[in-house]
Amino acid sequence: MALYAIGDTHLALGNPSKTMEVFGAGWENYVQRLEEGFSQVSETDTVVLCGDISWALGLEQAREDFAFLDRLPGEKWIIKGNHDFWWNTVTKMNAFFAANGFHTLHILHNNCTFYGDIALCGTRGWFYEENGTPQSEKVFRRELIRLEASLKAAGEHEKYCFLHYPPLYQGYRCEEVLELLQRYQVRICCYGHLHGNSHRLAETGERDGVQYRLVSSDYVGFCPKKISD
């Protein structure tokens, strides 16, 4: 049994015009590479998908993408990314998964789940300011509430946190998110969102007692990153 994480699968099996291959050689044959990358995962393993799962605009349009993910080995826990426009209420998403027999797909949102004694917590996160442009403070504050709710749900268990947006990178620190990670003694924080040339901005390794890991698909070579045995 092992724990893995990967973000930004950006699937578009139901809408091939949105394929990520238009962004260059780094994304060539990325669906096949994802399938090959998951070959290291066993059926008893757990994989956290750190947002930007599918380009679909609704659950029905995402059906083929979810079917693809469900066929891959392991139990998958999904957090929301900024491009997951298919996202709905947890009740509707779980009902859709059940109705279609997608039994390996689960939602991590306003809750936590457990990998042995380790609590897996997370939410999308948000940039309060991106490239000098102010973003929605209302959304930002809501994401802080969701993150703390997830961390509180973990109780006294050891905590790993999974975000879509990085809480820090070169030239940027989200102090509110970093404060929550430190206050709740999060040991590992995985995040996605950064692609291509932005990989060079990633902060990885230990910062103030937290281990940060970038797990965007194109950063990890479309191969889920092992987080824990």
Image: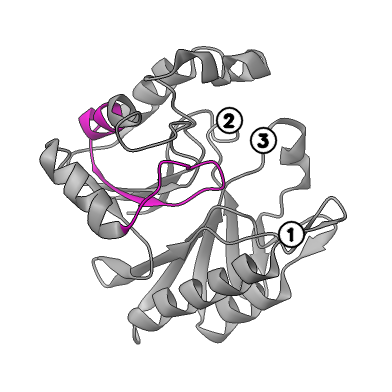
Q: Upstream in the sequence, badge 1 or badge 3?
A: 1
Q: Upstream in the sequence, badge 2 or badge 1?
A: 1
How packed mark 2 is, by other alpha carbons closer than 10 Å (few <14, some 14-19, many 20 or more), is many
The magenta segment = 66-89
**177 w.r.t. 166: above or below:** below
> Is there CB contact under 8 Å for labels 2 and 3?
yes
Q: Residue at x 49, y 19 (%)?
A: 30
Give the percent coordinates (x, y) of residue 127.
Answer: 70, 59
Residue hosting label 3: 195
Is residue 1 visible in the rendered image? The answer is no
Is residue 107 visible in the rendered image? The answer is yes
Q: For numbered disc 2, what is the local secondary structure?
A: loop
**Alpha carbon distance from label 1 to label 3:** 20 Å
- Give yes or no for residue 79 being in the magenta stretch: yes
| Of the pair 175 and 158, the residue shown nearer to us | 175
Kind of residue at disc 1? Gln
**156 w.r.t. 34: above or below:** below
Residue hosting label 1: 135
Q: Upstream in the sequence, badge 2 or badge 3?
A: 3
Kind of residue at disc 2? Asp
Residue hosting label 2: 218
Q: Is residue 107 left or right of residue 172?
A: left
